[in-house]
């Protein structure tokens, strides 16, 4: 299901569809948003392990960086962090928290 209608939205590698939910509400999304959140992890680290590292940061109270993966996802999905749908987008937490 599309959640991002912007030109240049990330494409799903299986279907080729752009802006679909898997690009924003998944381990893949967390991994894609790590650089924007200032979190550096090894490129060879599997997606599931990257998600675990973000969850550890959140559990340790580092919500400024770990929370950025969620805020970035909702901003990307809606085009604006203050749009009416951005609050709904934040319900889907990439961090599992």
Image (cartoon, helix red, strand yellow):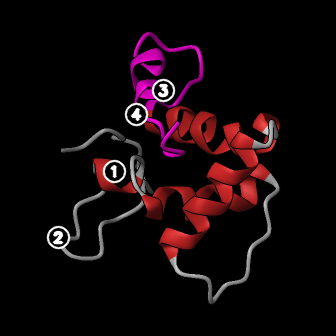
Residue found farthest to the top:
84
CB atoms of marks 3 and 1 within 8 Å? no
- For discs 2 and 3, the disc positioned in front in the rendered view: 3
Of circles 4 and 1, which is in front? 4
Q: Secondary structure at mark 1?
A: loop
Residue under pointer 1: 19
- Is label 2 in contact with label 3 (beta carbons under 8 Å)? no
* Residue at 51% in and 33% down: 74
Residue 80 is inside the magenta segment = yes
* Snapshot quadrant of residue 9: bottom left
Asked if the residues shown at circle 2 and circle 4 are in contact, with their CB atoms under 8 angstroms apart, the answer is no
SS category of the residue bearing label 4: loop
Q: CA distance from mark 3 to mark 1?
A: 16 Å
Q: Label 4: which residue?
A: 92
Front-most of 91 and 96? 96
- Alpha carbon separation for disc pair 2 and 3: 25 Å
CA distance separating discs 2 and 1: 11 Å
């Amino acid at each position: 299901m599309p959640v991002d209608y912007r030109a240049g939205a990330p494409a799903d590698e299986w279907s080729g569809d752009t802006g679909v939910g898997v690009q924003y509400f998944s381990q893949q999304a967390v991994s894609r948003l790590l650089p924007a959140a200032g979190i550096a992890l090894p490129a060879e680290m599997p997606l599931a392990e990257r998600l675990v590292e973000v969850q550890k940061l959140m559990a340790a109270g580092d919500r400024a960086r770990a929370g950025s993966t969620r805020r970035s996802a909702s901003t990307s999905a809606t085009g604006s962090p203050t749009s009416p749908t951005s609050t709904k987008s934040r319900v889907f937490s990439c961090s599992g928290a």
